[in-house]
Structure formats: structure tokens, C-alpha cells
Amino acid sequence: MRYFGIIGLSIVLIANLKAQGKYWGKVSGQWRNYYMASWNKEDLKDFQTLATGGKLKYEYNFKEKPWKVGGAIYTSINLGLQDLDVPDPITGKYSRYETGMYNGNNLSDRFILFPGELYLNYSKGGHMLTLGRMKFVSPFLNPEDGRMIATLEQGLTYKYSNKGFGSFQFGAFNAIAARSSDGFYGIGETIGFYPIGRGVDGKEVNYAGSTESDFLLTGNLDWNVTEKIKINVWEYYADNVFNTTYIKPTLSLSDELAIAGEWLHQFRVGDGGNQYDSLRYFADRTSNVLGAEVSWKAAKKSKFSIGYDRILDGGRFLFPREWGREFLFSFQKRERSEGSSDNHALVFTYDQQIKLGNSNLRSIASVGRHWKADLTNAADNKYAVPDYTHFNLDLFYTHEKLKSLKPELLLVYKMANGTVPDNPNFYFNKVDMFQINFVVNYNF
């Protein structure tokens, strides 16, 4: 309870300072409280956790100048609802989800605190330059705000925006504070914080702590070709590991109807992380993902979409899970396509906003069918995930008089399809499981 008292007192003091104007610059932040619980199949262990924390941010704008400096401290506190140090006794594995709220390298560490943002920013005439520690948003390198602390980056970014043309940008990073860590680590060091699965030959692969990579480069072009045609291109170059190109064209057929496509192409760079096969992260020479999406705005406050992705045979789609979510058309919260080859996925999503007096309820419901390669085929199924059907219901509530309060409820169920071998490792944390996520954010 003392943690709640400290955070609550901090919010009161900051609010008082803001009201009286006794500071230079801008103070903002978020108090975040997160309950997560997962129920696994039959005798497999269930997990739950409750965390509190958030961030405290300060930003100063130089008067009549395009410069500003900023910084933010992030924290996550395990309130001890369950000992996550104790694994499932049947499989010997730990929680896949709940441990992501804290330091995955040291689950006994119940308190994380580090400066996640510390930057110098220049912004003028459509140009924006940022140097330091920051929050970076892109389709694959992003905050992935599904736990307590978002993924953050350290480096340099430049972006130019033009209302008619669109925008282009590039970035260079030498360190990442991955979710499930206690601070910033080198690019290669961050690969392997999460479970590493199997090598292409089915044997154990130990790339965690053995991936040699000093920097990550990104590039982006967001081009308004015409009023109805837009093309989004992203490039990710991980030193000595891989190069990933992502292209997404979108055609607006009307104000209500749009179609889009996506192509992701990867190839190995250098040693793929390490010269030894048993320590190499990116083993295949290439990989490719093709996708299509149709979206329809049924009304001003509702949208329906159908997304399909095909990971071609001949190479696993790999992108470090530690770096962000994969915003492919078939993405659903609490699962990935990463680590798969010869894979199909089809997802139906309905996004609706409901007005309830002074309140607003946004619901995002999705149903996905995911066809995976055979469980014994390690080359095409890195994490041995069975075929499954995925159901998500994500609810966001806001009230006009309580705009700072942002509660969210996410319900997840993943059901195995077909016949799955009687091996608990194929079920635990993967399928025939239900999960509840209840988040209460207070933004100030």
C-alpha cells in the first residue's frame, strides 16, 4: 500500500504545482494500474499479477525558439499478488504474459525505475529532429503498450512532413529499453529477452546474449500519391542480423470503403547475429509476407475490416518480439505470427463507438483463424504453436467529466483447432487458454 501512497502523493503535489504555475516548462505523466490473469488448460498452472507504476515527464520549450528538452522516468511495481518465480510444475515453464510486466531477466526484482526518455528536440517548418532517449512509433519497432512500460529507444531521428506530399524520416539507434527489461541495452543484447523457441533444425538455439549487433537503422516514406492512393514504406536494417522492407499501398474507393495490401521482405545481413549456427538468430536467407485488407466504415462511429496474411514457405518471418508489436493485417493482441513460415491467418475486426449519455464506450471485437505449420516442423513453426482460433474483445471507457481516467478491459480466448498431440508444452501459454486484462490509467 505504501507504493500507492507515494504515487498518489506525487500526483497531488504535481497537480498543485501546475495549478499555481510554480515551475518552468510542462509536467505530465500517467499513473498506471494493471491486473492480468491467465487460465491455462486443465492441470496446467494459472497465473495472475497486479502492478502499479507509470511515468512522470517534464518538458521545457525555449521561448520563441524551435528547441525543447524533455525527460521521463518510468516505473513498474509488482504488488505481490502471486510469486511469478514459481513455474508451472508440469512443463517447468514460467508465465509467458504476466512476467512481461516486470524485469524478465530477474523476476524477483519487484521494483523497476529508470529514465526512459531524455531528449533534445528541434521542430520548425515541417522538420523535426530528436536526439536522445525517446518513444518511437512504427509498424514493427514501437511502444507496444500492452504491459506496464512501453518499449523505448536511444538514438537520433529526423522527420520531414508536408501536408500535400506526406512525410519521410530516418532513425539510427544504438540501444533499446525493451518491454520486460529494467533499462537500456545494446541492440544485440535485447534480442532474446523473450522465449527463443527452436532452431530451424529443431535443436536448441542459444542466441540470447550471443547476438552481435551494434546499431539499428530505420527509414520511412509515407507518400500521398493522389487523393485516394497512399503508399507507406518502412526499412529496418539491424547490423549483422537482417534487413526488413515493408510496403503498404492503400486505395480509398470511397469515403466508406478502402482496400490495402502489404508485402514484407527480409534477408539475412552478415552472420545473422553470430557466425555459429547454434548461436545465430536469423538463420534463413530470406522470408516474405503478403497480405490484403478490406475496411468499411459502416457509420461515423463504426468500422469493419477483414485482414489476411500469408507467410510464404521457404523462410521464417522474424522480427524481435522485444522491439514491438507486428502491425500486420492479421495481428491480434496476445499473439504473434513472428517465428512462422508457410502460415495463413484471416482476421475479422469490428470497431464501434457507443455514446452513453456523458460516457463513451469503444469496443474492438476480433475473431481470427490461424493456420500454422505442423508442430514437428521446427523450420516453419519456431515456437511450436498449434492451429488456433483467436477471440478478442477490447473495451475502452471515457467520461466527459473524468477525461483523465482511462480504463480498459481486454478479454482473450485462444482455442486449439483439430487434433493436438497430448503434450502440455503445445498448450501451455498458447491455446485453450483464457485471459483477462484490466487496466486503469490516470493521465495528468
Image: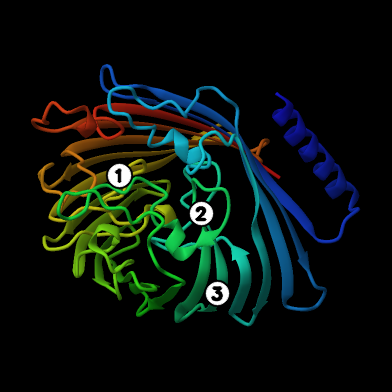
Mark 2, secondary structure of its residue: loop
Name the residue that disc number 3 marks.
Answer: 157
As displayed, is residue 38 above or below residue 367? above
Name the residue that disc number 1 marks.
Answer: 349
User: Which amino acid type is marked by label 2?
Assistant: Thr
Identify the residue at horizontal 46%, vertical 72% (top origin).
215
Q: Quadrant of the N terminus?
A: top right
Q: Quadrant of the C terminus?
A: top right
Expressed as whole percent of the image width and height from the top left, the position of residue 115 reads 67, 55
Which-is-in-front pick, marks 1 and 2? 2
**Residue 308 sits in quarter:** bottom left
CA gap, disc 2 and disc 3: 16 Å
User: Which amino acid type is marked by label 3?
Assistant: Thr
**Residue 394 sits in quarter:** top left
User: Which amino acid type is marked by label 1?
Assistant: Thr
Expressed as whole percent of the image width and height from the top left, the position of residue 243 reads 32, 73
Mark 3 or 1, nearer chain start? 3
Identify the residue at horizontal 51%, vertical 77% (top origin).
163
CA gap, disc 3 and disc 1: 33 Å
